[in-house]
Image (cartoon, rainbow, N blue to C red):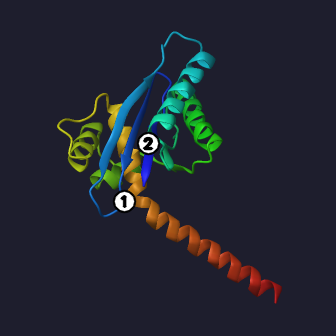
Amino acid sequence: MRVLGVDPGLTRCGVGVVEGVAGRPLRMIGVGVVRTPADAETARRLVAVEEGIERWLDEYRPEFVAVERVFSQHNVRTVMGTAQASAVAMLCAARRGLPVALHTPSEVKAAVTGSGRADKAQVGAMVTRLLRLDAPPKPADAADALALAICHIWRAPATDRLQRAVAAQRIRTTKGSTA
């Protein structure tokens, strides 16, 4: 499984590609940051994010895209930019027919470090260890993108089984109510 992780942001949008399957060693394929100038107008910045993500999709050809789920922050302006960048990432994936998974920050931290309250340094250290890197990816947005991809690889099999079970239950319920 090859996953593009996206840590959305307007100034720095972390991107990272990880390949592997749950229970086996994972491999980093690429990591980076799509940057936009803070003084540019929002519409131009969103185009730059879109172009950057499209380049990553073209070059690395992931099978899935994992995006950090935007959560409420105190600074509305920051959360708006993050949500807009997140929407761009989902749009790019959907345009190509790629499945998109949203993972909360605490879900990613728990998957990678064992604690949903881990700090950025702990996430970076575990990403470095899990992918057998020489040093944590910089900036933290890049490490976070890799953590998103790792989280998705590890959680996708269980999520898929759960979704199939729910669908099967719906079918059984529907058949039972039409009898």
Location of residue 96 (image quadrant): top right
Q: Earlier in the sequence, mark 1 or mark 2?
A: 2
**Few, some or many residues within 10 Å of mark 2 (<14, 14–19, 20+):** many
Is 4 left or right of 179, judged from the image as shown? left
Marking on residue 5: 2
- For badge 1, the amino acid type reads Val
The residue to which callout 1 is attached is 21
Q: Helix or strand or loop: what does disc 2 sit on?
A: strand
Residue at 62% from the left image edge and 38% from the top image edge: 91
Q: Is residue 179 visible?
A: yes
Residue at 51% from the left image edge and 9% from the top image edge: 39
Image: 151 above or below 135: below
Residue at 36% from the left image edge and 42% from the top image edge: 146
Quadrant location of the C terminus in the rendered image: bottom right
Residue 46, given in percent of the width and then of the height, sits at 58, 23
Residue 157, given in percent of the width and then of the height, sits at 45, 65
Q: Helix or strand or loop: what does disc 1 sit on?
A: loop
Is 70 left or right of 125, judged from the image as shown? right
Is 88 left or right of 159, judged from the image as shown? right
Marking on residue 49: none
Image: 66 above or below 156: above
Q: Is residue 116 visible?
A: no
Per the model, the C-alpha gap separating discs 1 and 2 is 15 Å
